[in-house]
Image (cartoon, helix red, strand yellow):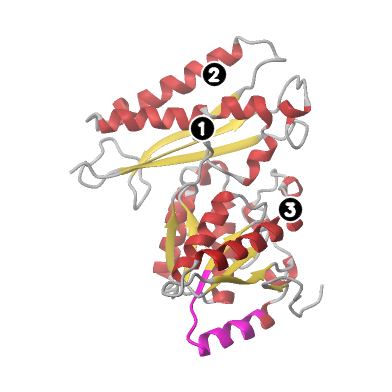
């Protein structure tokens, strides 16, 4: 691809690093500020809410769209991740129109002025990236945070996340970078990385954006289809039940997590009792009650500090999909991992 920015949009699109750095330097010399929203594309309202937050706090917003290969394990299908470039840039163009119309003279909003959509060669210039646990390459590892929760079943995931974020932070040198609370472990890992490596970018966390029924928005939701989507709400409902237990005064691990486990076990039993043509099965990977800073599992929540309640379930492929609506993208045969979390705020 060409190394020069493409100028057919209201923002510039950069495929390589040097021209973006030149543009960034011009903004710096003009005393403008940059808010950065890193994404893997397949943009949804959760991403757009982060862009709005960045536009409210900066004169310029950079968005990256890059499906990062190093956070996919060897058994995970990188090729199945949704790639929706045309609809992504259309959404960002509409958002720029919204930002132009929403600002005031006394409080103008920033604009999306740059999209970084690099090639894999631009991001990993020395050698092709590897997904093996013991593979060669230049990586950033944040342990033990990256080995907990999601990292226990996806051992290279946070190595890939930290590595690509460090690269992006070095390229963009943003004043602020914006991440969603849905990926809570990612936010903890990135905060730790920025602190430990003295990265001069402030990390800002936006609230989880949800559908009207509570399902956390995710780029992978397009694979669910109607049947699995309805059952997939079990994770959010289980976390809410545990949250209610905490709000009622319960602070022990057993009391809080038992409330969540009852929900997941009950719904799974109900699905297993249905015909294959009617059910959607899932496996609970984990439900965690952890310290908000270290992600160490807690036996008792300190009411003065709170906790992070998080979980992950794996929605199995449909056994007998009956309609296009039920199948979703991928004909209902793509396994879908759903993650979610709730933050237990201090009670005192």
How many C-alpha atoms fall within 10 Å of the one at disc 3: few (<14), some, or many (≥20)? few
Tell me which numbered mark, 1 or 3, is placed earlier along the sequence: 3
Overall secondary structure of the magenta section: helix
* Farthest left residue in view: 348
Q: Is residue 41 visible?
A: yes
Q: Position of residue 310 (x, y in %)?
A: 43, 39
Left or right, residue 88 beside residue 110: right
Magenta range is 20-35
Residue that label 3 marks? 84
Q: Nearer the viewer, mark 1 or mark 3?
A: 1
Residue that label 2 marks? 268
Left or right, residue 120 beside residue 200: right
210 relative to 174, above or below? above
Real-space CA distance between mark 2 and mark 3, rounded to the nearest whole angstrom: 33 Å
Q: Position of residue 129 (x, y in %)?
A: 70, 62
How many C-alpha atoms fall within 10 Å of the one at disc 2: few (<14), some, or many (≥20)? some
Find residue 329 and report its image quarter. Answer: top right
Q: Nearer the viewer, mark 1 or mark 2?
A: 1
Q: Position of residue 283 (x, y in %)?
A: 57, 27
Find residue 39 and report its image quarter. Answer: bottom right
Q: Look at the numbered discs 1 and 3 and tell me whether their residues touch, using CB distance below 8 Å.
A: no
Real-space CA distance between mark 1 and mark 3, rounded to the nearest whole angstrom: 25 Å
Q: Is residue 141 visible?
A: no
The residue depicted at 52 percent of the width and 44 percent of the height is 150
> Could you tell me which secondary element the residue under label 3 belongs to?
loop
> Could you tell me which secondary element the residue under label 1 belongs to?
loop
> Could you tell me which secondary element the residue under label 2 belongs to?
helix
* Farthest right residue in view: 1
> 56 or 136: nearer the eye?
56
Tell me which numbered mark, 1 or 2, is placed earlier along the sequence: 1
């Amino acid at each position: 691809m060409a190394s020069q920015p493409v100028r057919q949009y209201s923002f510039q699109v950069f495929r390589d690093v040097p021209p973006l750095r030149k543009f960034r330097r011009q903004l710096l010399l003009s005393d403008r500020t940059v808010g950065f929203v890193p994404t893997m594309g397949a943009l949804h309202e959760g991403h757009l809410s982060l862009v709005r937050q960045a536009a409210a706090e900066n004169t310029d917003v950079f968005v990256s769209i890059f499906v990062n290969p190093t956070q996919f394990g060897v058994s995970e299908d990188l090729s199945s991740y949704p790639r929706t470039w045309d609809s992504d840039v259309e959404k960002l163009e509409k958002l720029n129109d919204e930002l132009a119309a929403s600002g005031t003279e006394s409080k103008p909003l920033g604009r999306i002025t740059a999209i970084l959509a690099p090639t894999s060669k631009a991001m990993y210039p020395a050698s092709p990236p590897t997904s093996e646990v013991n593979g060669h390459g230049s990586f950033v590892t944040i342990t033990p945070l990256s080995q907990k929760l999601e990292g226990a079943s996806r051992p290279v995931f946070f190595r890939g996340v930290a590595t690509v974020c460090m690269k992006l932070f070095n390229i963009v040198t943003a004043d602020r970078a914006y991440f969603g609370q849905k990926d809570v472990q990612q936010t903890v890992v990135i905060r730790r990385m920025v602190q430990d490596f003295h990265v001069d970018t402030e990390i800002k966390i936006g609230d989880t954006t949800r559908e009207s029924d509570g399902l956390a928005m995710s780029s992978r939701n397009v694979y669910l289809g109607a049947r699995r989507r309805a059952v997939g709400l079990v994770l959010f409902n289980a976390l809410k039940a545990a949250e209610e237990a905490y709000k009622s005064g319960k602070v022990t691990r057993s009391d809080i997590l038992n409330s969540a486990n009852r929900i997941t076990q009950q719904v799974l039993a109900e699905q297993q009792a249905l015909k294959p043509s009617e059910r959607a099965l899932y496996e609970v990977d984990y439900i965690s009650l952890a310290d908000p800073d270290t992600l160490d599992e807690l036996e008792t929540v300190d009411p003065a500090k709170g906790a992070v309640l998080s979980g992950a379930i794996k929605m199995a492929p449909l056994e007998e999909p009956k309609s296009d609506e039920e199948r979703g993208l991928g004909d209902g045969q793509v396994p879908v991992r759903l993650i979610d979390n709730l933050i237990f705020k201090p009670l005192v």
